[in-house]
Amino acid sequence: MIKVCKFGGTSMADGNTIRRVAEILRADPARRYVVVSAPGKRFGGDVKVTDLLYAAHTELERTGACGESFRKACERFRSIVSELGLAFEIEELLAETEREIERERSVDFTASRGEYLAARIMAAFLEIPFIDARDVVKFRADGSLDGERTFTLTANALRGKRYAVVSGFYGEGADGKVRTFSRGGSDVSGAIVARAAGADLYENWTDVSGFLAADPRIVDDPERITALSYKELRELSYMGANVLHSDSIFPVREAEIPVLIKNTFRPEDEGTYILPTSKYHFTGKTVTGIAGKQNFTVIHIEKSLMNAEVGFAHRVLGVLLEHNISFEHMPSGIDTMSFVIDSECLKNGVLESLCEDIRKTVRPDGFRVFDDIALIAVVGHGMSRNVGTSAKLFNAIAKAGVNVRMIDQGSSELNIIVGVDNDQYSRTLRAAYEAFFLE
Ligand code: ADP
Ligand code: ASP
Ligand code: MG
């Protein structure tokens, strides 16, 4: 039996939490390979090491040298080493890291050092080998993960090692430079190691007792989901339930390795299993979970007989391609078509030039743009079995006095997505949760 364990930022926050991690690992000899994140927040208002490092890069660009933020990050590692009472050459390692950051001058390299240093310290504390993700996790020139190469290199590095610590969040690009995943990417690193180790289980240790049916920062004490399928996880985490990175599923999917979300601070709690869709048993619940994200822009196009005009959608999509913009959803009707796009991608004049090009290309009868839109996704395999799910959802939203700006129901019947104004986001999420979980 092999288990791969990933510990997130709060589990790595200070000497005390790292001692808990060590206890968890010692409690089960099957927990052989460990992936760690950079130290996270120790208390409300604290700053994650990764955020300090992003700030350090901005300072580096401005002044040409590591400044205050880098010093603060160093301080975090110094206190961890001293709290653990570890004989470890931390000063040397920090000085070398500073030199490398100033030489590399790359945002990804700087950000990756949180995981690198955390993993070095963890390996020393546990007295087991350290594997640098740079040597085993490889990206292609287009930035995508080179899965085959990565799994082979990682498996080779693990071979012959009974235990090891691997740094999360980063790898090496085709240009030989360090490259990170998107934020929260140590979850993906953990999944890669699980796949390469041929693990029976990927344990993802965090600061909540499992995947909850809604964001606990918005809904008061939401219920825990006992099990969800890979597909449901994709929908929920992509739509904002960031307890597990949505890309974590790809490395484990083919090998059908289950993922178990556990709480480092309450290891006795059961947690949540994320299972291959084929092994997932219907729980009887209509809705498995609810998630959401703010700050989208909806571009709405109207043209009579749009449906009959061959190639209409193709031309609109061509304009998006020219602007290198991807969209999240595309709800459509007979004479209407909308695109939901992350507002972040439309900043600095991009929206204006995109709209102008769409107008020129397809000459619509009507054209509207709504911004400050939040999306709420209601997800569950059970929705295809039960009638009346959308009626229930829209009733609840109407009762809460919220105006729905957009609706998209995926053809898989796995989700319903509603768009509302940003300032109605929390209210809508709570109303949806109450409708399906507090009936
Ligand atoms: P880690 O640093 O361990 O990777 P994260 O901060 O990335 O932890 O993820 C855990 C956090 O995700 C929780 O503390 C919680 O606030 C947030 N979260 C958002 N949605 C959910 C959800 N549906 N279930 C559980 N946690 C959620
Ligand atoms: N430390 C990185 C972040 O804050 C990666 C992670 O936590 O998974 O995004
Ligand atoms: Mg995380």
Image (cartoon, grey):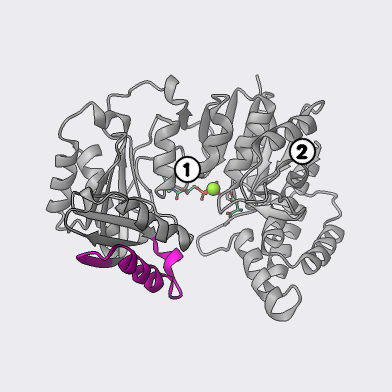
Residue 436 at what x, y percent from top left?
23, 38
The magenta span reads 342-369
Describe the element under mark 1 as helix, strand or loop: loop
Mark 1: which amino acid? Val
Residue 269, given in percent of the width and then of the height, sits at: 47, 32
- Residue 331 point in image, percent of width and height: 27, 49
Q: How many other residues sit within 10 Å of disc 2, few (<14), some (14-19) or many (≥20)?
A: some
352 drawn magenta: yes
Which image quarter holds the N terminus? top right
Residues at circles 2 and 1 in contact by the CB criterion of under 8 Å: no
Amino acid type indicated by mark 2: Leu
Q: Of residues 194 and 69, which is closer to you in this image?
A: 194
Q: Looking at the picture, does residue 44 appear above or below residue 158?
A: below
- Which residue appears at 73% of the width and 50% of the height? 174
Residue 303's place in the image compared with 243, above or below, is below
Residue drawn at the location 85% of the way across and 49% of the way down? 87
Neighbours of disc 1 within 10 Å: few (<14), some (14-19), many (20+): some
Comparing 225 with 19, the one in front is 225
Residue 163 as seen in the image, left or right of residue 365: right
Of residue 311 and residue 17, the one placed in the foreground of this image is: 311
Q: Is residue 112 above or below residue 266?
A: below
Is 258 magenta? The answer is no
Determine if residue 342 is in view.
yes
- Checking the image for residue 126, the label placed there is 2
- Ligand 1 closer than 8 Å to label 1 CB: yes
Residue 263, visible in the rendered structure: no
Which mark, residue 208?
1
Compared across the picture, whether 437 is left or right of 315 comes to: left
Distance of label 2 from label 1 (alpha carbons): 24 Å
The x, y position of residue 130, in whole percent, is 79, 41
